[in-house]
Amino acid sequence: MSENGKLSRRRFLGTALAAAALVPVAGRGLMATAHAGELAKVTEDDPTAVALGYVHDATKVDTAKFPKRAGDAGASQFCHNCSLYQAAEGEEWGKCSIFPGKLVKGAGWCNAWVAKG
């Protein structure tokens, strides 16, 4: 076989492996576009939720443990005004990029909160 034939096979295998590596990424994108009503709601005992201090009711945050939520500036922090939160106007629950495939409550809060820009 010629040297060109080997390069073509190598190129084909490399392209096939790269395409196979993208399958999980494409699946995640499909999950992100799923209808919000079909997604599970994150629970406060979810390991990521516990680590970030997520609660469904932002007024119940332990501000001694999460001082970011303390004071006047913290009192205005809710999932619904976080840049990571995505929900239609008036929806009580929405998607959050911190919890892929799950919904968070708009009145909730976690330590990953970032002001909408």
Image: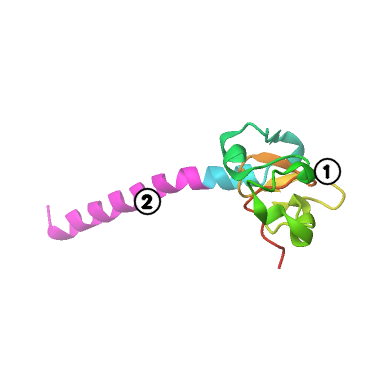
Residue 59 % position (x, y): 79, 45
Q: Look at the image and give the residue range highlighted in magenta.
A: 1-25
Q: Amino acid at mark 1?
A: Glu
At 84% from the left edge and 46% from the top edge, which residue is drawn? 91
Q: Quadrant of the C terminus?
A: bottom right
Q: Nearer the viewer, residue 6 or 64?
A: 64
* Residue under label 2: 18
Residue 43 % position (x, y): 68, 33
Q: Amino acid at mark 2?
A: Ala
Question: Mark 2 or mark 1: which comes first in sequence?
Answer: 2
Residue 54 % position (x, y): 67, 42
At 40% from the left edge and 44% from the top edge, which residue is drawn? 20
At 70% from the left edge and 36% from the top edge, which residue is drawn? 39
**Number of other residues with Cα within 10 Å of mark 2, as a class: few under 14, some 14 to 19, many 20 or more:** few
Q: Quadrant of residue 52?
A: top right
Residue 14 part of the magenta-drawn span: yes
* Residue under label 1: 92
